[in-house]
Amino acid sequence: KAGDYMALLTPVIKAYLTHMGFEKANQALQLHGGSGFTREWGLEQIVRDCRITLIYEGTNGVQALDLVGRKLASNGGRAVFSFFGDIDEFITSVEGSADMDPFVQGLTTLKGQLQEATTWLMQNGMTDFNNAGASSHDYLHLFGLTGLAFMWAKMAKVALDKKSEGDPFYDEKLTTGYYFVDRMVPDGAAHLAKVKTGAKSMMALPAEAF
């Protein structure tokens, strides 16, 4: 199982987290206005350093192709179905906790969208790999978002158990988690829609048009 997970999640972790890291560095630079683009604050260096991470060890586009072209279908999809099973097991373990509802609902929504995207790829990507290639980026991002929702749900459970200790860290952790549920979980629907669009419009132009 560990080997399955290492193979399945390596492209997701590499590509999704480097993409998001670069995006957040850009947003941090934006907060400084025009001066953020200068060396005064040091953020321009962070943005440039983060940018190379999307290219190291194979570009993120290649990582997405690896995920859908090799890792997803390996051993009959054993790794991804195991991942879904672990999520289901966690959700069952926190049933009845009203405080966990926002995190469980967000995780349930994303897991359902990822399952739908996985089924679509298995049905449409194997017969026409252009479909898999065209959908790979959004599939990987939906996978990464689902993984983060799983981790936020786990962190929320710990924070809820410990918040009575009075450490403000746990309240702040929950507040950040609620932000994730409210502002990032909805992105899953857009990724799913783009996965299911397939390759038709992307591959419509002939090579000569370029």
Image (cartoon, helix red, strand yellow):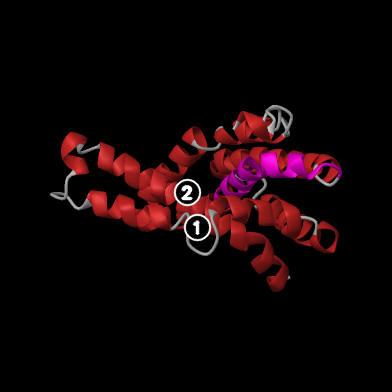
Q: Which residues are magenta?
A: 127-148
Residue 74 located left or right of residue 16: right
In the displayed structure, 181 sits above or below 155; it is above
Tag 2 or tag 1, which sits nearer the N-term?
Answer: 2
- Residue under pointer 2: 19
Q: Image quadrant of residue 90?
A: bottom right
Residue 166 x/y as whole percent: 33, 55
Q: Residue at x 69, y 36 (%)?
A: 195
Q: Residue at x 62, y 40 (%)?
A: 138
Q: Main secondary structure of the magenta part?
A: helix
- Taking the image as drawn, is residue 85 in sight? no
Front residue of 47/90: it is 47
Q: Residues within 10 Å of mark 1 (few under 14, many from 20)?
A: some
Residue 92 located left or right of residue 137: right
The kind of residue tagged 1 is Val
In the rendered image, residue 80 lying in the magenta stretch gets the answer no
Front residue of 179/163: it is 179
Residue 147 x/y as whole percent: 59, 52
Front residue of 128/22: it is 128
Q: Indicate the quadrant containing the C terminus: top left, top right, bottom left or bottom right.
A: top right
Residue 12 x/y as whole percent: 59, 55
Which label belongs to residue 158?
1
The kind of residue tagged 2 is His
In the displayed structure, 153 sits above or below 124; it is below
Q: Residue at x 33, y 42 (%)?
A: 26
In the displayed structure, 88 sits above or below 178; it is below
Q: Residues within 10 Å of mark 2 (few under 14, many from 20)?
A: some
The kind of secondary structure element at disc 2 is helix
- Taking the image as drawn, is residue 163 in sight? yes
Whole-number angstrom distance, CA of label 1 to CA of label 2: 28 Å
